[in-house]
Amino acid sequence: MSDEAEDLARSYVAMLEATPREGDSADATGVPEGNEAAPPSPLRIVEALLFVGGTPLTAQRVGEIIRGFTPEQFTQSLDTLNRAYRQQNRPYTILAQGEGYSLVLRPRYRGVMEKLYGGQREARLSTAAIDVLALVAYRQPATKAEVDSLRGADSGGLLRQLVRRGLIQVVYRADAAQREVSYGTTPRFLEWFGLQSLDDLPRTQDLQQL
């Protein structure tokens, strides 16, 4: 979904200078929503970026997308959204993930995700898939060429398998400056392995040599 996140961010850039029109109705977060032709508010852009997913969203990244948007405004937006989600009894919330924030299911709804993706028993990975996942986790953002070179074998199928299982995602798209997409781990990867952040990954002498 990170491909879509980058597309979404670009599509909004052209509309950031405009403001919502007067007279529009407001929802529980106090943001006007009545006019579909009006550009989205900064709060709605933050919510959209969280919804699309990808790497945890940081104040710095939002500041690059919404010119002049400060870290204080980012924190206030997260508080406003979480307050609205609690009032509306939504099944999701915004939680800190490493240095950023992600939109995640509340604990009571985690079973729904396991039914969708399969539990750990059903999602057991082959040795080759674990090798690829380890390389992405410790070297992210990592390209297919880098993973292939380190493994000495083609990893395209395994990377696609890990993307389908929600354990890795595309974090950078190919463009003029970068000829290949780059992969990184997802919040589901952290949950699946019982980690709070990537800093909790084991740091043994062998792993540091990867």
Image: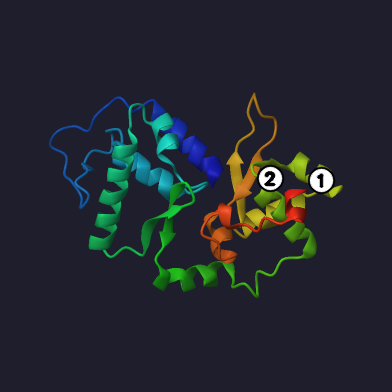
- Measured Cα–Cα span from mark 1 to mark 2: 11 Å
**Residue at image x 27%, y 26%?**
18
**Residue at image x 16%, y 44%?**
25
Query: Farthest residue toward the front?
Result: 205
Name the spot of residue 55 as percent of width and height, x first: 52, 46
Task: Mark 1 and mark 2 in contact? Answer it, CB < 8 Å.
Answer: yes
Q: Is residue 190 left or right of residue 179?
A: left
Which color scheme did the rendering employ for the protein? rainbow
Q: Is residue 181 left or right of residue 6?
A: right
Name the spot of residue 105 as percent of width and height, x first: 42, 63
Name the spot of residue 48 as percent of width and height, x first: 39, 45
Mark sitting on residue 169? none
Instruction: Kindly identify which residue carries mark 1.
Output: 150
Q: Does residue 141 sit above or below 70 in this rendering?
A: below
**Residue at image x 36%, y 42%?**
46
Q: Does residue 51 sit above or below 123 in this rendering?
A: above
The quarter holding residue 121 reads bottom right
As helix, strand or loop, the secondary structure at mark 2 comes to helix
> What type is the residue that disc 1 sits on?
Leu
Question: Observer-nearest residue: 133 or 11?
Answer: 133
Q: Is residue 85 left or right of residue 205?
A: left
> What type is the residue that disc 2 sits on?
Arg
Mark sitting on residue 139? 2
Going from N to C along the chain, the mark reached first, 1 or 2, is 2
As helix, strand or loop, the secondary structure at mark 1 comes to helix
Q: Does residue 122 sit above or below 35 in this rendering?
A: below
Q: Is residue 39 left or right of residue 95?
A: left
Q: Residues within 10 Å of mark 1 (few under 14, many from 20)?
A: few
